[in-house]
Amino acid sequence: MYTSSYKVCCLRTSFEFYCCYTNFKPSNSKGAVVEVHGYGGFKEETLGLAWRIAEKGFTTGVIDLRGHGEHLLDLDKNILSDLETAISHFRYYGKVTALLVG
């Protein structure tokens, strides 16, 4: 069994920014998966897959990249910082796999 929660977090890179994410947490996590949408997408498009991954025992975080969805920053050359920050944040749950969907 697991619960899902929606949070707006302040994650820090070389500068501070806000990154919205949806988090699915199983009761006994085997590790983590950071799920990222494709160009022009947003996190809500991939929630079904995130749910299935969590059912398999992995804490799953689905983020909006800058310039997409609820992310407050415009799309720019620092988009990789969003993914790197999310991976660092989810290391708390163990080994992290990044998954690009779309």
Image (spheres, rainbow, N blue to C red):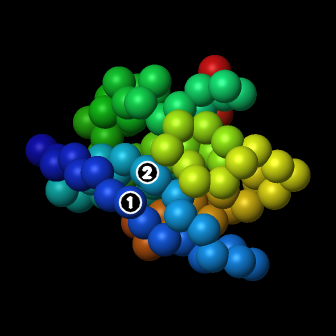
Q: Which of 48 and 78 is in front in this view?
A: 78
Residue indicated by mark 1 = 8
Please tell me the numbered disc located at residue 46. Answer: none
Tell me the kind of residue under disc 2. Answer: Tyr
Regarding mark 1 in the picture, which secondary structure is present there? strand
Q: Nearer the viewer, residue 72 or 77?
A: 72
Tell me the kind of residue under disc 1. Answer: Val
Please tell me the numbered disc located at residue 21. Answer: 2
Regarding mark 2 in the picture, which secondary structure is present there? strand
Identity of the residue drawn at 31% across and 41% down: 54
Query: With 91 as the anchor, is 83 left or right in this view?
Result: right
Residue most extreme to the left: 1
Query: With 32 as the anchor, is 74 left or right in this view?
Result: right
Identity of the residue drawn at 53% across and 32% down: 42
Return the x and y of residue 11 as percentages of the image width and height: 54, 71
Please determine whether, in this image, residue 35 is positioned above or below residue 52.
below
| Of callouts 1 and 2, the N-terminal one | 1
Return the x and y of residue 13 as percentages of the image width and height: 68, 74
Quote the CA–CA distance across marks 1 and 2. Answer: 6 Å
Camera sees residue 33:
no
Q: In which quarter of the image is the C terminus?
A: top right
- The residue mark sitting in front, 1 or 2, is 1
Return the x and y of residue 49 as percentages of the image width and height: 41, 26
Residue most extreme to the right: 77
Circle 2 Cα neighbour tier, 10 Å, few/some/many (<14 / 14–19 / ≥20): many
Return the x and y of residue 99 as percentages of the image width and height: 60, 38
Please determine whether, in this image, residue 46 is positioned above or below residue 7.
above
Contact check, label 1 and label 2, Cβ < 8 Å: no
Residue 12: quarter of image: bottom right
Query: With 101 as the anchor, is 31 left or right in this view?
Result: left
Identity of the residue drawn at 63% across and 45% down: 65
